[in-house]
Amino acid sequence: MIQYSKKDYVQMFNILEEYLKDKVQGIDLTILETVNARKNGKSFSSEEHLKGFIYAQLSALVSWKKIKDNQPRLNEIFYNFDCQKLKEKSAEDLINEITAIKCHNPYTTKNQMRSLKANIETFEKIEQDFGSLEKFITHSTPSNIIKLLADSKSTYKLKYAGVALVCEYLRNVGMDIIKPDVHIKRIASAERLNLVTAKNDYKIIDEFQELAQVIGISQVKMDYLLWNYCSKGYGEVCTATPKCDKCIIKKYCKR
């Protein structure tokens, strides 16, 4: 939804950036750095794709700080994301080792690990059909790629991976896309900042892609600023019950 001028949008995101820089400590810049690496010509290996997907799964309902702090051990547990070795490793061993370092979620980790072999085989099928995972994720629009990996009717559907999780995986390998999670959809909605009009996740992704092109700010940077402004433990301003009296971008909001 292109509502304001480019100058207004840029100003709003600049205000958010300055606020987060001063008020919020420990913000993770990994995805921004990864997207910049792709823009600068980096190509990601099969192991890096698998790593990006597994970390997206693990961090879905577990604190990212906890995952990041345990990365060296997680890399060991997953054999540095060697596909062949991982296909042979017991799902129960993976579950037990992840649980031992408290990087598990009681509702999701078991299913994720028990479906890992099948998901690796899906990645291998994609490589057979497209030549590489890199060619696959760049052969169509981002929303089409996400649909191929997240839609239950797709040949390439990844188990226990919905739209938001697939977006996180693709961002982990440098794709510049928004992740339509609850925070982003809430703050960007017509009821608040009115950045998008769509309710459907795929259309939200398309609208953010259009907005990024118009204002010249990457989708991952917009996501990073908006998400951190909303999320618990970070900005905690535009939450389910927003703290409008503390909002520094209130003039852009529809509330």
Image (cartoon, rainbow, N blue to C red):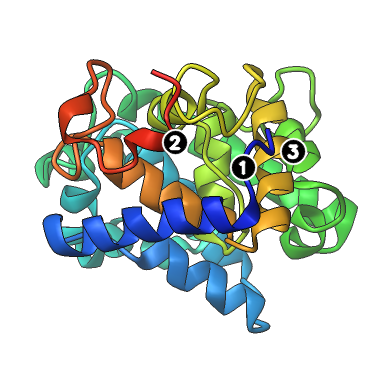
| Image quadrant assignment for residue 130 | bottom right
Question: In x, y percent, where is residue 151?
Answer: 71, 23
> Could you tell me which quadrant the C terminus lies in?
top left
- Residue 11 visible, this angle: yes
Question: In x, y percent, where is residue 63?
Answer: 20, 41
Residue matched to label 2: 252
Q: Do callouts 1 and 2 mark residues in contact (Cβ within 8 Å)? A: yes
Amino acid of disc 3: Ser
Secondary structure of the residue carrying numbered label 2? helix
Query: How far apart are the alpha carbons under marks 2 and 3?
Result: 27 Å
Seen in the picture, residue 55 relative to 72 is either above or below; the reply is: above
Amino acid of disc 2: Tyr
Q: Which of marks 1 and 2 is nearer the N terminus?
A: 1
Q: Do callouts 2 and 3 mark residues in contact (Cβ within 8 Å)? A: no
Label 3 environment density (alpha carbons within 10 Å; few <14, some 14–19, many ≥20): some
Amino acid of disc 1: Tyr
Question: In x, y percent, where is residue 148?
Answer: 77, 34
Q: Look at 39% across and 43% down and name the residue there.
A: 226
Query: How far apart are the alpha carbons under marks 1 and 2?
Result: 9 Å
Q: Look at 43% across and 51% down and name the residue there.
A: 12
Residue matched to label 3: 143
Residue matched to label 1: 4
Question: In the displayed structure, does residue 107 sit left or right of residue 183?
Answer: left
